[in-house]
Image: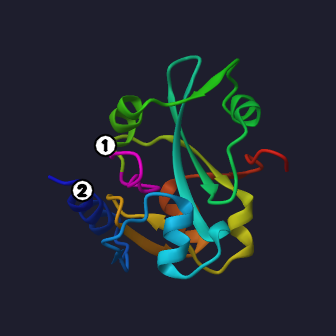
Amino acid sequence: MSGADRFDAAVRRLGFTANVQRFPEGTKTAQDAARAVGCDVDQIVKSLVFVTDGRAAILCLTSGRHRADLGKLAALSRSAEVHRATPEEARAATGFAIGGTPPFGHPEPLATWIDETFRSFETVWAAAGAPDRVFPIDPETLAGLSGGTWADIAEGT
């Protein structure tokens, strides 16, 4: 089953209707996605996977303009150290390849932190299981479906 199929099955299980849009030219980077959908790069949800010193995977839903602050993530996860997951670690934790990782629909729930920047928008855009698929979602629904916690996770904020 493809990542897109797994995402579609997950949203059906959650009872959510995702208005998935496909862009054959790809939406792998935040800039590509913003250009494709015609929104501000801040409205793009980057689903980034990190690994704590205890080897637990955590998910960071970061605005397309921001980089996640490893020190803030370590403090939030009560870890001495956090590092960016390798592509293999990210796929093992989420079931999806980097560039198409959605904010929910993973095999097991992940501790999830959400960039507070999203609260200033009515709609944000997230990956839908493949690098050429995205969907719009309001930030509060994003928080509810992902089980995430709002936090200041961006560098320099």
Which is the main secondary structure of the residues drawn in magenta?
loop
Secondary structure under tag 1 reads loop
Q: Position of residue 152 (x, y in %)?
A: 77, 49
> Which of these two is toward me, 115 or 40?
40
First in sequence: mark 2 vs mark 1? 2
Q: What residue lies at 37% left-to-right and 40% top-to-bottom?
A: 108
Judge left or right: residue 141 versus residue 10.
Answer: right
Determine whether 132 is above or below 70 in the image.
below
Residue 42, magenta (yes or no): no
Above or below, 28 against 19 in this view is above
* Image location (x, y in percent) of residue 148: 58, 52
Q: Looking at the rendered structure, which numbered label has been put on residue 6?
A: 2
Residue 115 coordinates in the image, percent (x, y) = 69, 55
The location of residue 17, given as percent across then percent down, is 36, 77
Which one is nearer the viewer's eye here, 42 or 54?
Answer: 42
Dot label at residue 95: 1
Marks 2,1: beta carbons within 8 A: yes
